[in-house]
Image: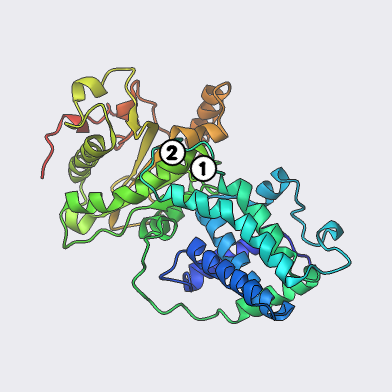
Amino acid sequence: MKLHVTRIQDVVRRMVQDIGTYWAPASADGHAAAEVAVLEQLVATGGFGPAEAKKHLVEIIVASTALANAYGVSLQQAFNDASVPADLTEASLWPEQPVAPAETAVRVAEAFAPVRATMAFYRSDARQGSDPDVVALRHSIPHLLRAAFTGFDSADDLSGQLLRHFDALRKPAVPVASAEFDPSQAESVGLIRPIQTETVCPFALKSTLWGSPSYDESLSFEDNMRRSLPSVRQFIRILDRDVVDGYVYAFPTRIFGDSFEDLQQLFRNFVDFLHRTMTDAAPAGLDPAVATDPKWFLVLESEECFISVFAPCYPHDHSRYMNGVEGHFLFMLQPEAAVLRQLTKNDYHQRSEAIRFRFRDGFQAYTLADIEIDRFLLPMRPDQPPVKWYELNVTS
């Protein structure tokens, strides 16, 4: 069997989409931590063999790969950067003499320590970039997986263990109350997927997205927005290190209405909330007089962000068409840091122009407005003037 880290990453992604995270209510890293602790306990007590160790190592491999998926880590690129073969049939990965289970357990525990520290930082209230010693998951996960691989005799041994593991995971996990919301599996991420797959934007398909908790109709708009704050702040916190390209909010049209006027009012309230809660400079909310300055950009928790608005009221020849998704308005935060991973400052203008030409060639032309605030919520037709949604009064 041809074994490659990309294939492991793909099957774990499919598994999570199919049955969910079977380790819930634990998180992926929480599950890996529990398995590492079991290995350490086995080392302390002695008397365990390779077969028992492999069961726990498979769990660590699957959970760590799910964590990589959630945080936008391309394992092939990460392995290449770490000078570790991504082709797991590479002979250098498999020494002639298998590593003893106790030694593998020690290596795995050491390799998991930076992953544990990084996840603690990502879940903290610390500001982005405030801890220079945090190691990006894209740097630490390859070494954790490599350490776990040493517990297997060969690529065929690892393949066989993984095949048996995934074969046993064919039924959806029993629903449980999750101890931690997973933004990578949010409803809004599923809702925007048809837009990801059908848009002509060349970067969308490979983008890793997070989303807000599903809208709770029993709560107010303000309270629903507050529920999103921990995960959207975490999304911004990781941008210095790992790769998540956007954060998606979904608002049901049955609650907010489905007209273009309804969309404008909701978006006005949405941006005002973000301004009040996630900017230091304007806790009183968005000031249209300031926001219409040509030098203005939306800065949330010190990160410049763009917002793309998708709505069912946009027709099929519009660049913000929802490709058949109905019943929700979708607002996607796109940090400048994620954009600059694809478009450097030197070629930003040229390549962004090329993307707009691709939309035009796909019969979805749009006119680039002169100022940033007019580029978020687009008019119904490209020949219409910018939408002055920010001139509306905020409603409760």
Q: Is residue 41 above or below residue 211?
A: below
Image coords of residue 144 (percent x, y):
65, 57
Classify residue 235 by image quadrant: top left
Q: Is residue 320 left or right of residue 37?
A: left
Residue at the extreme top = 294
User: Which label number is shown at residue 364?
Assistant: 2
Image coords of residue 272 (percent x, y):
21, 36
Residue under the image location 33 percent in, 72 percent down? 177
Residue under the image location 70 percent in, 76 percent down? 161
Q: Are marks 2 and 1 in contact (CB under 8 Å)?
A: yes
Q: Amino acid at mark 2?
A: Gln
Residue at the extreme front = 45
Image coords of residue 162 (percent x, y):
67, 73
Mark 2 closeness class: few <14, some 14–19, many ≥20 residues within 10 Å: many
Q: Is residue 152 above or below residue 285?
A: below
Classify residue 282 by image quadrant: top left
The answer to whether residue 375 shows anywhere in this view is no
The residue tagged 1 is 200
Residue under the image location 75 percent in, 46 percent down? 83
Nearest the eye: 393 or 156: 156
Nearest the eye: 298 or 388: 298
Residue at the extreme right = 96
